[in-house]
Image (tube, grey):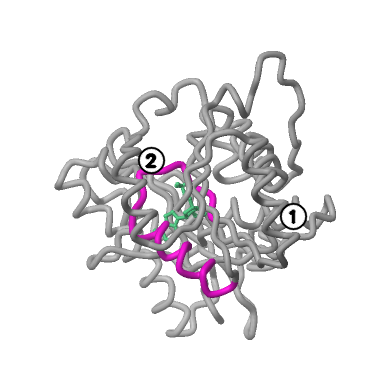
Amino acid sequence: MQIVTEPRQMQIIAEKLRLNRQLVGVVMTMGALHEGHLSLVKLAQESAGTVILTIFVNPRQFGVNEDLHRYPRPFEQDVALARSAGVDYLFAPEPETIYPENYQTTVQCGLLAERFEGAQRPGHFNGVATVVTKLFHITKPHVAIFGEKDAQQLAIIKKVVNDLNLDINIVGAPIVRENNGVAVSSRNIYLTSQEHLDASVLYRGILHAEKRIAEGQRDLFNIAEEIRAMISSTPGFRADYVEFVDEESFEPRKTAEAGREYRLLLAAWAGTVRLIDNGRIQV
Ligand code: AMP
């Protein structure tokens, strides 16, 4: 595995790979690698001959009161994990090379970026879209794998790629969960052991929705209310949003129609830690 830190060097390597008719797959992360990230690497290996993993804690997607400075950065451990997963190139730039002095250009997302996570974190998705677009131009992939864990991010990246005619195949990867259903996340280390156990309430909410739909309940607003109550009755937990959206358009939906697919989006605070999760709901 070759470690690359300079954008220009990464571009030269990526261009050579393309000239050698290699299919290039990319997995973009903020590091603190875990099973979720490694499942993305595996999917990338299944769809491309060469895999580039990027590690970059992107300052532009953190709000002023967020965890940019305390975000975990176990670089040596990440290098070892990436190597043993069979990653071909690890691209880990410094913030100054991605955003040099007098950097000005950003990718501005549309309406979808203002809801849900975007409402809570203004500017977050513009930061994501900007760095993802830059990393696309630096790594020149044919295919890019993103986790369904961040379902809104995945939808926004698909929109950026479509709207800007980027010639990249975006693949969504299923959520990797712990035994009790908690979605694996780099931020789970901020949870106390009790909060970590109780965090399964989000997954239990998804299971509850599946059960209610199977029972014939079609009032999505009502199901969401029940899940909000489950979260609020967990000590130290506070629901932020619990909403069903159409799987295709990501538009909020209050009533389920037979034969359609929805996505249940959940966000909650466990003390000071923000948790997000989601699940596909087939009616
Ligand atoms: P992050 O390092 O949190 O920015 O995540 C990098 C990529 O890994 C994103 O595409 C995430 O959606 C994905 N990811 C994070 N956690 C999981 C998980 N538990 N299961 C699947 N993918 C994940």
Task: From the image, tell me which residue sits under label 1.
Answer: 159
Rendered image quadrant of residue 251: bottom right
- The amino acid beneath tag 2 is Arg
The residue drawn where x is 23% and y is 68% is 179
For ligand 1, tell me if the residue under mark 2 lies within 8 Å.
Answer: no
The residue segment tinted magenta is: 27-47
The residue drawn where x is 59% and y is 73% is 47
- The amino acid beneath tag 1 is Lys
- The local secondary structure at tag 1 comes to helix
Residue 223 seen in this snapshot = no
The residue drawn where x is 15% and y is 47% is 194
Residue 188 seen in this snapshot = yes
**As rendered, which of 126 and 278 lies closer to the eye?**
126
- Image mark count: 2
Residue 274, labelled with which disc? 2
User: Is residue 46 located in the magenta-colored stretch of the structure?
Assistant: yes
Q: Of the residues under marks 2 and 1, which one precedes in the sequence?
A: 1
Residue 96, labelled with which disc? none
Magenta highlight: main SS: helix
x and y, in percent, of residue 103 in the image: 71, 20
Label 2 with label 1: CB-CB less than 8 Å: no
Image-based side of 87 in relation to 167, left or right: left
Image-based side of 149 in relation to 131, left or right: left
